[in-house]
Image (cartoon, rainbow, N blue to C red):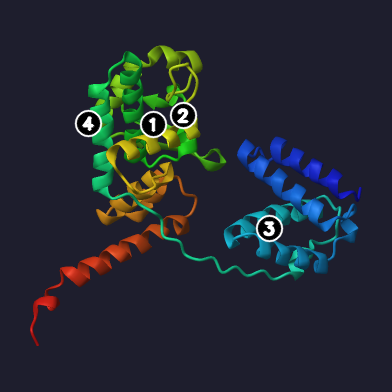
């Protein structure tokens, strides 16, 4: 068999049924490989030379940011490794291609703690002042969502897919299924967060039981990530916060705050569900920036008159 599209279809089937990749990874592979097949316009794998691949890579660099190019190439390299494994080709042509990436170091965007305090206070005030039963329930649910984001550093996708059975409000633990179906268990340590989660669960127990998810809307459906984003924008506006806040910024703030409190980075890696310590180390750059501010403003040398 030499037909590229047939091999791609077989490979995606292999990824789903044998490698057991999750649906999001499969969708990304499908998009990347469809784009690859369309751009190189070759029906047979034997027609794909290193020159063609190098031109394709150059085209990717012109169209996308380095991080995106890196991900797309990883998808294509995996396809060629599969073809080599199945003996569709003798050896992958990527063995003869050198690709170097210069990815800019983008520091994680965090939320000032004063802003988080203001945001949470606004939600609780809205709950107290709610004129209708519906608005009061919504504010309660919204407070529980924001508290959970900040208390655990959970990803928005993980929060929205969190099953009720994986939230233990007796032991105050949350079992999270992260990227690559990796499990991690986090504790809810703060008493205020525990209280609001208990109140939310008590109020929304019927809707939660109906759909099986922990965070739900008032129509008994799982909360979507778009709904959470709208929620954050709504309360940011009410609180008069100019900063554009995303759900992922709570995760960054969670990690950075713990690192600045001298928590071992390996504990933070485990709580975030990172597969490698190298991923977590991006937060050390933020801490270094904090150190610079401390040393510039607090060090006694600035008061010496020489």
Label drawn at residue 191: 4
Query: In this image, 22 relative to 285: left or right?
Result: right
**Alpha carbons under labels 1 and 4: distance apart:** 15 Å
- Residue 73, position in %: x, y? 68, 58
> Distance of mark 3 from mark 4, alpha carbons?
46 Å
Q: How crowded is mark 4: few (under 14 residues within 10 Å), some or many (20 or more)?
A: few
Provide the residue designation for mark 1.
174
* Marks 3,2: beta carbons within 8 A: no
**Residue at coordinates 54% horizontally, 65% vertically from top-left?**
103
Residue at 34% x, 39% y is: 237
Say which label, 2 or 4, has the lower sequence index.
2
Helix, strand or loop for disc 3: helix
Q: Looking at the image, do the residues carrying marks 2 and 4 touch, with CB atoms under 8 Å apart?
A: no
Q: How far apart are marks 3 and 1 (CA)?
A: 35 Å
| Residue 254 place in picture, x, y as percent | 33, 46
Above or below, 236 against 134 in this view is below
Between 302 and 155, which is closer to the camera in this rendering? 302
Taking 198 as reference, is 64 above or below it?
Answer: below
Question: Gap in Å between the C-alphas at discs 2 and 1?
Answer: 9 Å
Mark 1–mark 4 contact, CB under 8 Å? no
Q: Which residue is denoted by mark 2 in the rendering?
A: 162
At a point 13% along the width and 77% down the height, the residue shown is 302
Nearer the viewer's eye, disc 3 or disc 1?
3
- Give how far across and how far down residue 300 sits, in percent: 11, 74
Q: Are marks 2 and 1 in contact (CB under 8 Å)?
A: yes
Does residue 189 show up?
A: no
Residue at 26% across, 66% down: 291
Label number found at residue 224: none
SS for dot 1: strand
Residue where numbered disc 3 is placed: 73
Q: In which quarter of the image is the C terminus?
A: bottom left
Q: How far apart are marks 2 and 4 (CA)?
A: 21 Å
């Amino acid at each position: 068999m030499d037909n590229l599209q047939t091999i791609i279809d077989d490979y995606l089937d292999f990824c789903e049924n044998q490698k057991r990749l999750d649906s999001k990874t499969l969708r990304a592979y499908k998009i990347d490989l469809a784009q690859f097949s369309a751009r190189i316009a070759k029906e047979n794998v034997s027609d794909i030379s290193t020159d063609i691949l190098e031109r394709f890579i150059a085209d990717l660099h012109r169209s996308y940011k380095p991080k995106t190019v890196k991900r797309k190439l990883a998808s294509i390299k995996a396809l060629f490794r599969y073809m080599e494994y199945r003996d569709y080709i003798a050896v992958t042509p990527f063995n003869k291609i050198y690709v170097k990436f210069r990815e800019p170091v983008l520091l994680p965007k965090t939320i000032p703690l004063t802003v988080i305090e203001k945001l949470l206070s606004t939600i609780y005030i809205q709950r107290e002042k709610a004129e209708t039963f519906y608005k009061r329930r919504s504010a309660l649910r919204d407070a529980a969502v924001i508290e959970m984001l900040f208390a655990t550093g959970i990803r928005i996708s993980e929060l929205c897919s969190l099953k009720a059975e994986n939230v233990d409000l007796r032991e105050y633990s949350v079992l999270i299924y992260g990227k690559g179906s990796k499990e991690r268990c986090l504790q809810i340590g703060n008493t205020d967060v525990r209280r609001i989660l208990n109140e939310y669960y008590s109020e929304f127990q019927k809707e939660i039981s109906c759909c099986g998810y922990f965070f739900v809307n008032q129509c008994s459906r799982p909360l979507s990530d778009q709904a959470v984003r709208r929620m954050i924008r709504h309360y940011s506006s009410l609180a008069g916060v100019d900063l554009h806040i995303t759900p992922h910024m709570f995760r960054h703030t969670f990690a950075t705050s713990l690192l600045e409190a001298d928590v071992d980075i390996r504990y933070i890696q485990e709580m975030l569900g990172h597969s490698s310590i190298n991923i977590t180390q991006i937060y050390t750059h933020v801490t270094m920036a904090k150190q610079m501010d401390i040393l510039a403003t607090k060090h006694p040398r600035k008061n010496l008159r020489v």
